[in-house]
Structure formats: structure tokens, C-alpha cells
Image (spheres, grey):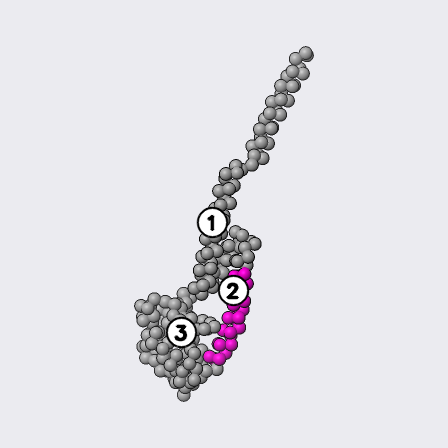
Amino acid sequence: MKTFPLVLLSVTLALSTRYGCAQSAKTSPMPESTLGAQNAQNIHDAHDTLSDAQRAYLRGDMDTAKQLFKIELELDPHNVTAINYMRMINTQEKSNGETSALREKQLAALILPHVELNEATLGTALDYLKQSAARQGVTDVSFVVQAPQDVVDSKKVTLNLSKIPFTEVMRYMGEFTGFKFAIEKYAIVVKPDAVTVVTSASPVPAPAATP
């Protein structure tokens, strides 16, 4: 009976020591050297991302620039440079969208008297289309082809059409070649459409001539 308090005291001290160690392990802060290294890496990543975003913007690659500026703002939400660039990109996108819609209406109203192509390469067909528009007084048509030259040369176009809108000719060319035409502010971008690529096994018949 006399030793009971000593045993109880020993057990209490043991539990207190064990509990204190557990709490210390849970709440022990990360070493300052580790935190400093992480902060330095974050700053380095943010700087690289911002530089890449600015370079993409200057070369006119707005899609890449926008994505990189978004990443930059995730790393540094208060970065004034990235915020200002995003404002400029959003303003340009709105303006380009309105201009592209107006441009598409203008080209849809442009009626070509006659279009005749026989197994012409896509590049030749685009030059022909540009010249046809110029003969109707529209001299600011410009195509930007985003595809390797050998791919462009391998695509053939055969058309025989009369009194047809400019935009309809582009649609027919797209069906024949598997390319898509995007009317943008300063040019018509022509690039492969992975969804509607036409293969030699499933040719599109040439449209009949319109009387």
C-alpha cells in the first residue's frame, strides 16, 4: 500500500513524456533552410513562366501566352505584369472576335463568277482563290497555311462552280483536303482538321457546275 503513489507517479510521468514527444513531432516546424529553398524555387519558376509568356505574346502566339500568364498568376496572384498582360489579351480577343465576324460577312457577300480547278494542289488553289477575289476588287485576302509544305502539295482540289460565295468555295476546299479555314482579323488561317480529314479511300465527289 505504501508503494502505490510511487507507481502512479511513475506511470503519470511516463505518459506525460510520451505524449509530449508525440505533440512535439506533430508540431515541429519545417526547417528554415527547407522553406527558403522552396520559396526560391517558386520565385525561379514564376520568373521563367513570366518570361516565356512575354516572349509568346511578342511573337503573336496569344494562346500560349494566355496559358502561361494564367500559370504565372497561380504562382503569384498579385503579379501586376501578368495581370496587365491578361487584360490586354482579353481586350484583343474581344476585338478580334468582332472583326472576324464582320470579315466573314464581307467574304460571304463576295460572289465569284466562276471557279475552275482541276487536280490543283492546295497551295495553287489558295493562290487562285486570292486572285479571283482581287479581280472582284477585294485585294486584302491573305492565307496563312499552318502545315508542312509536302502535306500542302499532297492535297488536290477539283472544282467547277459558278456564281458562288467566296466562303462556300473555302468550304468545298476544306471538304476535299481535310483542312479547315478560320477567318481571323488579318488573315485566313488554313490548317489540317483532324476530325474531318478526307482520305483517298473516301473521296468527296466534285460538285456539279451551277448553270
Q: Amino acid at mark 1?
A: His
Name, please, the residue furthest toward the bottom.
211
- Does 210 sit left or right of 20 as displayed? left
Report x, y in % for residue 107: 46, 79
Residue under numbered circle 2: 89
Task: Tell me which residue sits at (68%, 11%) in the image.
Answer: 2
- Is residue 210 shown to the viewer in this render? no
Residue under numbered circle 3: 143
Magenta residue check for 114:
no
Report x, y in % for residue 106: 48, 80
Q: Upstream in the sequence, badge 2 or badge 3?
A: 2
Residue under numbered circle 1: 44
Q: What secondary structure is the stretch in magenta mostly built from?
A: helix
Task: Tell me which residue sits at (54%, 61%) in the image.
Answer: 84
Viewer-nearest residue: 122 or 143: 143
Q: Upstream in the sequence, badge 1 or badge 2?
A: 1
Q: Residues within 10 Å of mark 1 (few under 14, many from 20)?
A: few
Indicate whether 105 appears above or below 74: below
> In the rendered image, which quarter is residue 52 located in?
bottom left
**Cα distance between the residues tagged 1 and 3:** 40 Å
Q: Amino acid at mark 3?
A: Phe
Helix, strand, or loop for circle 3? strand
Viewer-nearest residue: 119 or 79: 79
> In the rendered image, which quarter is residue 90 located in?
bottom right
Name, please, the residue furthest toward the front.
81
Range of residues picked out in magenta: 84-108
